Image (cartoon, grey):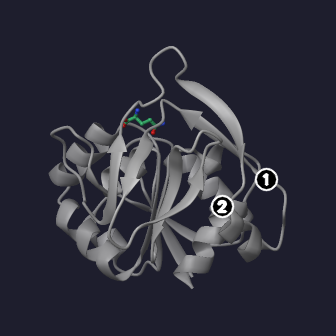
Amino acid sequence: MKIGVLALQGDFAEHIVMLDRLGVETAEVRLPEHLDDLDGLIIPGGESTTIGKLSVDFGLFEPLRDFGRARAIWGTCAGAIFLSKDARRDQPLLGLMDITVERNAFGRQVDSFEADLDIEPLELATKTDAPYHAVFIRAPIIESVSGEAKVLSVLPDGRIVAAQQGHLLATSFHPELTGDTRFHEYFLSLVK
Ligand code: GLN
């Protein structure tokens, strides 16, 4: 199995470290041909407008869309925004997932926080029952899911922070910034 990490901007290096720890072959993706032999792709956190614009500039926008129609993609934070079909702003979006997001939904003052989440499919896939400790940094909220998209996790107040649509995954938070590899393992279970 070989997993790519979109490496145009943001914290792609941290995802590669997590995948290395799981013994998975990885590749940094900067050009369309880098997608060819991949089984799955992670789009990291960073700045979604920048990631979108650079994808267009590097000729990756349509290839990413085609990739996501057939193969697994996981977007974390800015990556989740880029996967969405609506971010209520004019910016390039892949529109692969039937989710609407609100960027920077936690406001400026409280722009980073951590929370323990119960994510049942992840616990089942990794045969564990400890809550998942999630790190949010200027995070978006998934305002709504529609069509084929399903809610995967919510905050205690009910706001959606993870969604799944078949082989596509979106998280508001940053599993690459914790020591816990379970979310990466869960993604790999979708790739297989
Ligand atoms: N605030 C960023 C955006 O809207 C996302 C932040 C992140 O990826 N940590 O694109």
Badge 1: few (under 14), some or many (20 or more) residues near its Cα, within 10 Å?
A: some
Q: Could you tell me which secondary element the residue under label 2 belongs to? A: helix
Q: Give the quadrant of ligand 1.
A: top left
Query: Which numbered tag is attached to residue 170?
Result: none
Q: Residue furthest top?
A: 109
Residue type at numbered disc 2: Phe
- Percent position of residue 61, x then y: 20, 60
Quadrant location of residue 97?
A: bottom left
Q: Is mark 2 within 8 Å of ligand 1?
A: no
Whether 33 is drawn above or below 55: the answer is below
Which quarter of the rendering shows the C terminus? bottom right
Badge 2: few (under 14), some or many (20 or more) residues near its Cα, within 10 Å?
A: many
Quadrant location of residue 149?
A: bottom left
Whichever of labels 2 and 1 marks the residue nearer the N terminus, that label is: 1
Mark 2 vs mark 1, CA separation in Å = 12 Å
**Residue at horizontal 35 percent and vertical 45 percent from the top:** 101
191 sits left or right of 99 in the view: right
96 sits left or right of 140 in the view: left
Mark 1, residue position: 131
- Percent position of residue 39, x then y: 47, 80
Q: Residue furthest front?
A: 157
Mark 2, residue position: 183
Which quarter of the rendering shows the N terminus? bottom right
Q: Could you tell me which secondary element the residue under label 1 belongs to? A: loop
22 sits left or right of 149 in the view: right
Nearest-to-viewer mark from 2 and 1: 1
**Residue at horizontal 40 percent and vertical 44 percent from the top:** 78
